[in-house]
Image (tube, grey):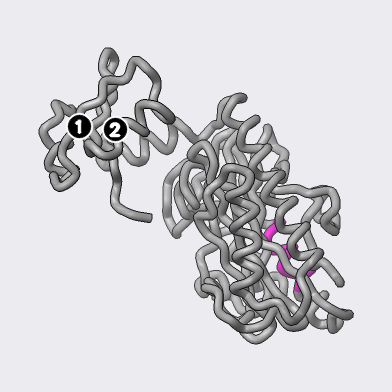
Amino acid sequence: MGPPIAGVLVGRETEQVVTFSNEADRLAAEELPDDVDIRTVPWHTPLESAVASLPAVRREAELDAQLRAARASVLPGELSRFERLCRQSAEILTAQLSAVVPETTERELSALVAAEILRIGADPVVVMAAGASRLGYKHPLVTDAPVGERAMVVVCARRHGMIANLSRWVRFGDAPASEAEEEQRLLQVEAAYLSATRTGRALGDVLADGAAAYAAQGFPADEWQNHHQGGAAGYAGRDPRAVPGISDLVQDRQLFAWNPSAAGQKVEDTVILEGDQIRPLTVDPDWPTVSVNGVERPVTLQR
């Protein structure tokens, strides 16, 4: 991800894009509507300086909370496009983790996943993989370590500006009873997050309810502090990430991606809140699931 290549001024009667001269033709031909006014500056001109000269009344950064609230409840067209991305992303992980072998390296596996994400016209914003020797890392940037007997893959795929988030596990051979039992307990922690995600609640309160579930499920009470727990989803990896005390309110038809984790365990899917029901979007019917509070949740793929 490089620095921005365009600045946009939006008003009741104004739509203007400021961009570098070497980007303008492509943007005009492939990305921007015909009625948008395009202003170009030389490639060596700092974009911030050019944007600063626009007669903007308010900067986007000043309106972060209001803009998040305005886009939180997705429109039918947005949801239709996003559902397809979520489904395809889940199918990619099913296909790749059904074909991987213990000798495959993390780097090879992530390359295969990233290639398939590109093939469907999406951007692999994040592709991480941890083999059996590296499952203790929360954000496992890939190495040449082999997948081994157990592995996790994490994906954030972006298309039409929206990001699908999901994690999946694969195991070769039977899992120890303790591992399978811990997976079930973590799904109960996730269920607490999903149950707490209800219209009108502050995101910080949802986080508090989910965090409290760790101790209730036999994990250390402070386990939630070892990694971020997710939050609202959509036009950013988390839009916003849930942190203690955050006051953003949950809206109907809003997207979420909670990702509770513990040592050697994690669960993550992108879901939508519809009324008082949670519906997972990153779903492939071929992936194994269990029902938790009436919601089908992914479990480890046994090979």
Residue at image mark 2: 24
At mark 1, the secondary structure is: strand
Residue 181: which quarter of the image? bottom right
Q: Is residue 281 left or right of residue 12?
A: right
| Residue at image point 18% right, 27% down | 57
The amino acid type found where label 2 is placed reads Ala
Residue 217: which quarter of the image? bottom right
Where is residue 129? Give x, y as percent.
Answer: 61, 71
| Residue at image point 52% right, 74% down | 226
Where is residue 275? Give x, y as percent.
Answer: 68, 32
Prevailing secondary structure class for the magenta stretch in the rendered image: helix
The amino acid type found where label 1 is placed reads Thr
Does the residue at mark 1 contact the one at mark 2 (Cβ under 8 Å)?
A: yes
Q: Distance between the residues labelled 1 and 2?
A: 7 Å
Q: Which residue appears farthest toward the top when viewing the image?
A: 13
Marked residue nearer the N-terminal end (1 or 2): 2
**Crowding at mark 2 (Cα within 10 Å: few <14, some 14-19, many 20+):** some
Viewer-closest of 109 and 198? 109
User: For the magenta stretch, what is the residue range?
Assistant: 183-191
| Residue at image point 84% right, 84% down | 176
**Is any part of residue 171 visible from this angle?**
yes
Viewer-closest of 154 and 295? 154
